[in-house]
Amino acid sequence: MTDVEKWCPEPLWLLAYPLLPDAPQRHQGGGRRRLDDRAVLAAILYVLQTGCAWSALPASFGVSAATAHRRFTEWVEAEVFARLHQQVLDLLGSAGAIDWSRASVDAMQVRAVKGGI
């Protein structure tokens, strides 16, 4: 099993693929060929799940740290991860696979005052 298959298994890829924005078109063509979205997604998921720095991304993904970070930024702005999260929750919820007895919500937001109270 490759790193791409491990970090972005087929069922997850099938959910994520339709959410990804279209690749930008180059007006005059040329340039480098765009890296595979699945490999980039796997690299991003690796960084997010392991907590490693972008620069520590293993070469086995075939994606540079700069490309992974740039695509991550593009996809966050396009709300790909928020929509993917919602889809996964919907699937798990409809399958009865979410244990709501252990769920908690924390919406506390307090402005920090310089120098204490």
Image (cartoon, rainbow, N blue to C red):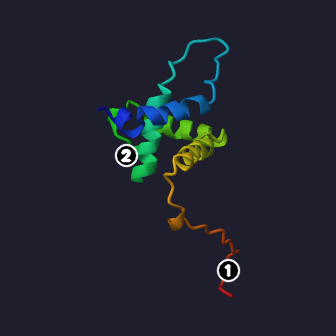
Tag on residue 50? none
Seen as rendered, the residue at the extreme left is 1
User: Disc 1 on helix, strand or loop?
Assistant: loop
Left or right position of 65 against 100: left
Mark with earlier residue (2, 1) = 2
- Report the Cα–Cα distance between label 2 and label 1: 36 Å
Residue 77 picture location, percent across and down: 66, 41
Instruction: Write the residue at 51% across / 22% down.
Output: 34
Label pair 2/1, CB-CB below 8 angstroms: no
Query: Identity of the amino acid at label 1?
Result: Lys
Q: Position of residue 73 (x, y in %)?
A: 59, 41
Res 106 → quadrant: bottom right
- The front one of 10 and 70 is 10
The label on residue 56 is 2
Question: Where residue 71 sits in the image (x, y, percent)?
Answer: 55, 36
Image side of residue 55 versus residue 100, left or right: left
Task: Please report the residue visible at 56 percent of the width from the left and 50 percent of the height from the top.
Answer: 93
Quadrant of the image occupied by residue 76: top right
Q: Amino acid at mark 2?
A: Ala
**Residue 86 visible in image:** yes
How packed mark 1 is, by other alpha carbons closer than 10 Å (few <14, some 14-19, many 20 or more), is few
- Does residue 100 lie above or below 93 as drawn? below
Question: What is the number of callouts on the image?
Answer: 2
Q: Residue at x 34, y 35 (%)?
A: 3
Residue labelled with disc 1: 114
